[in-house]
Amino acid sequence: MKNNNINFEKISSQRNRLGRYWYKYSRNPLSILGVITIFIITFMAVSAYYLSPYPESAGNYINFTEASQPPSFVHFCGTDVFGRDIFSRILFGLRLSLLMAIVVLSLSVPVGVFAGLVAGYFRGKWISLLIMRIVDIFIAVPTLLMALVVCSILTPDVFNAMMAVSIAWWAWYARIVYGVVSSVRGEFYIQAAEVSGASTGHILFKEILPNCLSSIFTKMSLDVGSVILIGSSLSFVGLGAQPPTPDLGTMVADGAKLLPNQWWIAIFPACAIVIIVLGFNLMGDGIRDMLGSEEA
Amino acid sequence: MEIIKFIIKRLFYSIFVLIGFSMLIFLFIRCIPGDPARLALGENAPEWVVERLREEMHLNDPIYKQYYYWIKGAMKGDLGISLTTQRSVMEDIRQFFLASLELTLYSGILMAILATLFGTMSGWYNNTWIDNVFRIIAYFGIVTPSFVFAIFFVLIFSYFFEILPTIGRLSSGLTPPPYITGLITVDALITGNYAVLIDAIKHLILPASSLMMGPMAQMARIVRSSMVDNLQKDYIMAERSYGIPERVIMFKYLLKPSFIPGVSIAGLSLAILIGNSFLIELVFNWPGLSRYGMNAMLRKDLNSVIAVTIVYSLLFIIINIIVDVIVNGLDPRIELGLARGK
């Protein structure tokens, strides 16, 4: 009985906290707009196969009788030179953009956070010096340039592009976490954990990591948009997804050659990129205000 | 004196960063399957030709020896032969760098002016319709990739209004001015060739603006928010209560402290600008180092890729040092140190 009570209280207090967060978040109508946008985009991307009027357009499909048609009620966003429906391709392209953000963040954040934790905790030791000097090297090159270079060395395809962006990205997390860890390194509760014989793993992940979470989440929520931007830039120059895979950046690049007569081929995918990134940035700003951290 | 010491220390330190970076790229290349010599010569080249090139490029040696040969050459200013242009990479860089510098320079200046203007206007009139208009512009600046700006600008200004050219540095009918500084606008101004000057500026407008929209928006937002913060500080209220005219408060007391955060992210903004230039120079066919580097990347011409990246990293490092010195000049409370950033 007693146990049940405690659990109940714990759950209800957690609910209160969530409610408070949501209250803070929902103060800004733009943040709500961001969430709705993301929700719709995710829905469209996940059910692209069912929503798209011409799902066969996503592949290596050629239909010259329908080629290069301007937007109409039959093809909302027109068709490209192969007669593929642009709207359907945008729906499938959304998938790759979202996948890009998910894969890049789930590869680069753990690596960066771990490096930052270790470097911050062992501050002054050789391992910390080594890690932070490597971080400096990665930060000394503009992110997009770094991603381009790595991507050009690898064979161009979607997953290598994701790898390349992750390689260019992790160092920023390492630096942020390093900053937070160095500032809490001398606190009494960490000394207490040390003298009571807690393992290094326990101290790193149970004592120090929770302090970094709000900075990490803030940075992550703001980064989703930037990752999608960089991903689309890579595929724009041909270092990302290869044809016929539908990818927004590649579609813009293909359409750019046909300006101004067939403007719809480039303009609609370009608008799609802007809308996704806008949605994620609005949400990111909302999360930053909610978590109340000023950095990043 | 402190500043000179700081600059020397930072430059010295950045040499290690550059060496580390070049090692890293070397390691990457080695870990990736594929033969640079075969790639350079194509599928159909006979085996003995490929073998000879491999020997010339020291590809048969272990990685540390390859790196040793490369760094020995780099010290003497020899960065190898470009596999695409068949010329020395150093020569290529010399030829293409100034075009990129010209574009980046004007773009950076435009960025600073517009960010200041938008940021201060927005901050000064905060929560009015002027502020809202500027904030919406800034938001779209941040979320739109540079190449999308380029496409929209080309569509509007080149195809719809037909007032600005889309590719290159000069129209084909004009002869470029004699080589003095390498920057066409400056050379044209020195020689008094105004027709060329105007044409060159016209060619610069579209690429320069599409390059700077993103970083400009970011900077404007930061200037705005620091301005709004400062407006609520006690000293501004005190000045208002003394009856100091609003203009004086704005220009004499408010601008300087509000600029500091904007200036301190200038390094980051210029990094984004440099990154964007790789896409924009390709779109506008600008004969600069970024387009050269981009083409090298697409053809896996690794000597050129490494060289271009190192040139830009060096530029970026120098920019960061300059930014730190300026920030220190504006706000002596911020100490110069090896630790950069926020």
Image (spheres, coloured by chain):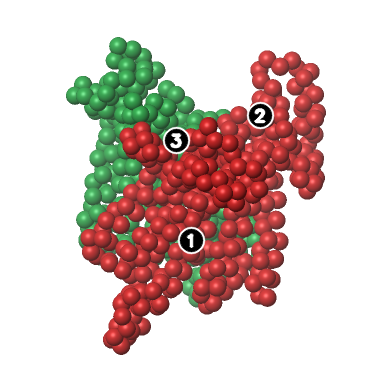
- Secondary structure, mark 3, is loop
> Which x, y percent locates residue B307?
67, 42
Mark 2: amino acid: Thr
Chain coloured green in the rendered structure: A
Q: Quadrant of the C terminus of chain A?
A: bottom left
Mark 1: amino acid: Ile
Q: Residues within 10 Å of mark 2 (few under 14, many from 20)?
A: some
Which residue, as the protein is rendered here, is positioned at the far top? A65
Q: Is residue A168 visible?
A: no
Q: Say which residue label 2 marks.
A: B84
Q: Residues within 10 Å of mark 3 (few under 14, many from 20)?
A: many
Image point (24%, 54%), residue name:
A30
- Secondary structure, mark 2, is loop
Q: CA distance from mark 1 to mark 2?
A: 37 Å
Mark 3: amino acid: Thr
In terms of depth relative to the viewer, which is nearer, A204 or B199? Answer: B199
Q: Earlier in the sequence, mark 1 or mark 2?
A: 2
Q: CA distance from mark 1 to mark 3?
A: 31 Å
Question: In the rendered view, does A66 fall on the left or right side of B180?
Answer: left
Q: Label 1 lies in what chain?
A: B
Image point (78%, 22%), residue name:
B51
Mark carried by residue B265:
1
Question: In the rendered view, does A201 fall on the left or right side of B79?
Answer: left
Mark carried by residue B166:
3
Mark carried by residue B130:
none
B4 relative to A15, above or below: below
> Which x, y percent locates residue A77?
27, 28
Q: Earlier in the sequence, mark 1 or mark 3?
A: 3
Q: Label 3 lies in what chain?
A: B
Q: Quadrant of the N terminus of chain A?
A: bottom left
